[in-house]
Image (cartoon, grey):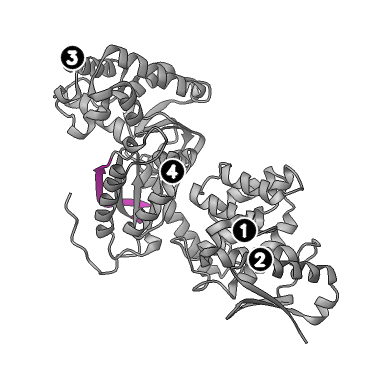
């Protein structure tokens, strides 16, 4: 696909873009939301087969990386003129698995000019349902299925609310590579592929049983390709049925090889992954009693756009109402509250540490509170979330609770958060106490260094679990690093806090990254 002509003209702020780095295809969707209605402006898709580039050690090969980077170069040209807050890029199963994903993501970001978020399987499922629910609204209880290159997402929901979301590590690319090597179709291959898919999906039998839903919809590439194939050959009106799937499998067996498969409605780029896709679909139909799977109008990429629009609306609402503490209500705030409840956080302590950490950060934040993350205040918000959750590890053990807190944050399901953002918040929490060397290269980035410092200082100043006024301490940048100034009267009345602050200055001295000075105002 040739790169579109670049334009440096600013893009209408109401136009948003989503990039989906899938295991089989990369997609760019550009759309506009106006009065609740969605209008697609542009859609680009390239078959990258990133998932096919994972080797036996789980590392992404150079050829697959090169295909991905070339595609992102073309996407970047199309996105010329977009502000960072108008674009969100997400990556799915292949980059959840790849052991060298960070190196690839760094290269990809430099090419695309945008951060790329690796999202969890359940977060992917939530966003898929958001896309389907908005573009194909219904109050009926639905089962939504999305078969990707290396994962399959299943969602049970009603209206715009997903009730149950799951992601399974089986997809059209991975299954095709394993059971249909060199593109050969055999009965034994289909049989083995269906057994493997069934084993992976078996744990979903109860929550997604037929009695739990009244209609089944299929989202994205595999379902769309098979639906078009059945309609073009007059087998069905596009609905995917057990009879239609058996016809497709018989057609594959009759051809014997993907290169010999010539059927109306079958695109050339789908041949290599058709065997795996059909095996998953047939397994789903048999195990979950799906008589007809209808193609859905929404998918992950639209869900990303709707989610991005909600975040932007929350930021704009903050600006209108003048929230002084940086609070912006979106799904992630609800997830933080749920984590606090689940792990029994001391809410008063979390709130006072958050308030003081943000007050300190306000005066030293790189380029102000609007720095980082693609949305205004995103780095500050990550600092706020870290403060609210810094003690959840106490539910495991008081000793080294910061390590337990960080582990929980890096691995728990938190709707609205990407895995990438969860890791950043977890790193802040890990660094809020103890030695600094454990953070490694994290402190080399200013966008991490200053939030870590502010969270550590707030935790020390609030260690007695008493309220500390924002006016007690001020933080400023100095040529050697940072200076914390305290009122002399307050400092004199809190000798234990002053001792902990002296220990903090030594911790930064040992780390060698920043010099921290503590001074008293006379």
Give the mark toward the camera: 1 or 4.
1
Q: Mark 2–mark 1 contact, CB under 8 Å?
A: yes
Q: Earlier in the sequence, mark 2 or mark 3?
A: 3
- Callout 3: SS: helix
Residue under the image location 57 percent in, 42 percent down: 411
* Residue, disc 3: 254
On screen, residue 273 above or below 427: above
- Callout 2: SS: helix
Q: Earlier in the sequence, mark 1 or mark 3?
A: 3
Q: Dot 2: within a 10 Å radius of its alpha carbon, few (fewer than 14), some, or many (20 or more) residues?
A: some
* Residue, disc 4: 127
Based on the picture, tell me whether residue 45 belongs to the magenta stretch: yes
- Callout 1: SS: helix
> In x, y percent, where is residue 370?
49, 69
* Residue, disc 2: 510
Q: Mark 3–mark 4 contact, CB under 8 Å?
A: no
* Stretch of the chain drawn in magenta: 32-48
Front residue of 438 and 418? 438
Q: Mark 2–mark 3 contact, CB under 8 Å?
A: no
Front residue of 30 and 268? 268
> How far apart, in angstroms, are the residues tagged by discs 2 and 3?
70 Å
* Residue, disc 1: 437
């Amino acid at each position: 696909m040739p790169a579109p002509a670049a334009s440096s003209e600013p893009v209408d702020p109401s136009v948003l873009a989503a990039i989906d780095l899938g295991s089989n295809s990369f997609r760019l969707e550009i759309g506009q939301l106006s009065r609740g209605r969605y209008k697609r402006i542009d859609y680009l898709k390239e078959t990258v087969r990133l998932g096919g580039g994972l080797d036996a050690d789980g590392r992404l090969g150079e050829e697959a990386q090169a295909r991905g980077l070339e595609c992102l170069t073309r996407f970047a040209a199309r996105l010329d003129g977009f502000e960072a807050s108008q674009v969100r890029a997400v990556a799915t199963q292949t980059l959840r698995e790849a052991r060298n994903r960070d190196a690839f993501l760094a290269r990809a970001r430099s090419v695309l000019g945008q951060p790329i978020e690796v999202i969890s399987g359940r977060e992917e499922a939530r966003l898929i349902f958001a896309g389907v629910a908005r573009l194909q609204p219904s109050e009926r209880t639905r089962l939504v299925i999305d078969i990707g290159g290396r994962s399959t997402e299943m969602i049970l929901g009603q209206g715009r609310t997903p009730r149950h979301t799951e992601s399974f590590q089986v997809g059209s690319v991975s299954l095709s590579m394993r059971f249909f090597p060199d593109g050969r179709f055999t009965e034994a291959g289909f049989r083995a592929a269906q057994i493997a898919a069934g084993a992976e999906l078996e744990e979903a039998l109860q929550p997604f049983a037929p009695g739990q839903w009244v209609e089944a919809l299929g989202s994205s590439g595999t379902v769309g390709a098979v639906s078009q194939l059945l309609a073009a050959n007059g087998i069905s009106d596009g609905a995917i049925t057990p009879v239609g799937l058996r016809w497709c499998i018989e057609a594959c067996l009759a051809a014997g090889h993907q290169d010999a498969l010539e059927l109306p409605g079958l695109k050339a780029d789908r041949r290599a992954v058709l065997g795996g896709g059909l095996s998953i679909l047939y397994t789903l139909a048999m195990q979950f009693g799906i008589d007809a799977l209808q193609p859905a109008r929404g998918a992950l990429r639209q869900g990303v756009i709707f989610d991005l629009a909600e975040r932007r609306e929350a930021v704009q609402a903050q600006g209108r109402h003048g929230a002084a503490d940086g609070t912006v209500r979106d799904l992630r705030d609800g997830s933080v509250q749920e984590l606090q409840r689940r792990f029994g956080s001391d809410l008063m302590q979390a709130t006072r540490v958050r308030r003081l950490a943000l007050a300190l950060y306000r005066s030293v934040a790189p380029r102000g509170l609007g720095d980082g993350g693609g949305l205004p205040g995103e780095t500050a918000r990550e600092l706020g979330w870290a403060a609210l959750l810094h003690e959840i590890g106490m539910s495991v053990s008081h000793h080294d609770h910061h390590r337990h807190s960080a582990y929980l944050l890096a691995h728990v399901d938190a709707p609205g958060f990407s895995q990438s953002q969860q890791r950043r918040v977890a790193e802040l929490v890990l660094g809020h106490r103890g030695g600094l060397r454990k953070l490694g290269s994290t402190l080399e980035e200013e966008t991490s260094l200053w939030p870590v410092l502010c969270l550590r200082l707030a935790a020390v100043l609030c260690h007695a679990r008493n309220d500390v006024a924002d006016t007690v301490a001020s933080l400023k940048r100095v040529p050697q690093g940072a200076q914390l100034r305290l009122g002399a009267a307050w400092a004199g009345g809190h000798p234990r806090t002053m001792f902990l602050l002296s220990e903090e200055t030594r911790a930064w001295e040992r780390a060698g990254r920043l010099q921290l000075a503590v001074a008293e105002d006379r």
